[in-house]
Image (cartoon, rainbow, N blue to C red):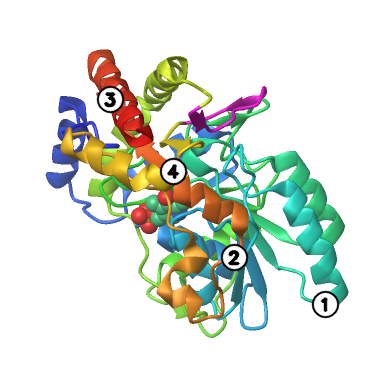
Amino acid sequence: MFSYGRQHITAEDIDAVVEVLSSSYLTQGPATERFESALASYCGASYCASVNSATSALHLACLALGVGPGDYVWTSPISFVASANCALYCGASIDFVDINENTYNLCPDRLEEKLSIAKANGKLPKVVIPVHFGGLPCDLKKIRELADSYGFHIIEDAAHGIGASYFNSKIGDCRYSDITVFSFHPVKVITSAEGGAITTTSEKLFKKVLELRSHGITRDPGKLIHDASPWYYEQQNLGFNYRMSDIHAALGESQLKRLDSYVNSRNELANLYNAQFDSSVISTQFVDTGYKSAYHLFSIKLTTIPDKRKYVFQKLKEAGVGVNVHYIPIHLQPYFRKLGFKKGDFPVAEAYYNSCITLPLHPQLSKEDQSRVCRYLKDAINEAAL
Ligand SMILES: *Cc1c(COP(=O)(O)O)cnc(C)c1O
């Protein structure tokens, strides 16, 4: 079975983790700090805070930006549910912006339209969360311009996007956003088993995230209200235990060293896929000049036979190809339908969902295996068209 994605663990990774196990720190300690500073410098961000998942990172990013009851947060319907849940954790309302049919990312034109309507209704979003779907950066300049004219904050959900770049700007440098969020779940581009991080250029947001990831407790002498004894600390806000452990950070730090080579192999494999497809039957994510995708996912659309997607999916599964579908539109999940969303709300996302299949793509996929995947796919499409 060729899975759609899988982790790659080397002897160096294992050594790095074992080293932590025999040190005096297991939870947040020196390995966490090293991982954070390596990530910040890789991305070119001023600050990085690690956490135990991207879900936690999204939650803290929203809280740090002051999201609460009465606020609106907008994201893409073609994403993992965590991109939307973070708003709900804060008591805010969630809404979606339909995707662009070629990039599968939140569409800046639809965002602009929706903003002008929201302005007239007095329901402008506090935060917009563009998701770099499959590792392809969103049109960040355009979204930044809209943020400046409509006054919202930007959290980049870069769970797929570590190692990607946008006009020579690394995803995570936050040149166009307030905060960027990464995931190190095993299926993502690099892993720490479970884990996530935020990067930012704002010291204020960074400090807020640090406080909230550890119970809302501060030991900063300048911030203490009632005492300054050497043992003293204060819980000043309601925080969480969202810390990353040193065991996880050591794995993440070790993996980060191979990030560029992973992203390059993923790009190479993606180019090979594109070269083998008949573009009149299969369309793939459009990568414009200036954009470099991290290619966390390789999702195709069966443009001419969307009604045969299930058949093709099943055939590939039977042939041992670990296909998948990314994603079921978030607004069609039962939980979100209960909030009032329904079929037809985001037609481009729904049409994409109805025709998409994720093919295997990871640095361990050999070119021979990839050619086999292409052959099985072609056969399945031909049979489906009969
Ligand atoms: C995986 C993923 C997340 C959540 O990541 P975790 O680290 O598993 O919490 C959030 N957003 C997107 C787009 C994802 O793919």
> Between residues 170 and 247, which one lies in front from this camera angle?
170
- Check mark 4 vs ligand 1: CB closer than 8 Å? yes or no: no
**Screen quadrant of the N terminus:** top left
Would you call the spot at circle 1 few (<14 residues within 10 Å), some (14-19), or many (20 or more)? Answer: few
**Distance between the Cα atoms at labels 3 and 2?**
33 Å
**Distance between the Cα atoms at labels 4 and 1?**
36 Å
Q: Is residue 220 above or below residue 34?
A: below
Which residue has dot 2 on it?
344
Would you call the spot at circle 4 few (<14 residues within 10 Å), some (14-19), or many (20 or more)? Answer: many
> Between residues 113 and 57, which one lies in front from this camera angle?
113
Q: Earlier in the sequence, mark 3 or mark 2?
A: 2
Which residue has dot 4 on it?
356
Q: Which mark is residue 373?
A: 3
**Distance between the Cα atoms at labels 4 and 2?**
17 Å
Q: Where residue 273 appears, x then y in whole percent?
A: 41, 21
Q: Amino acid at mark 1?
A: Gly
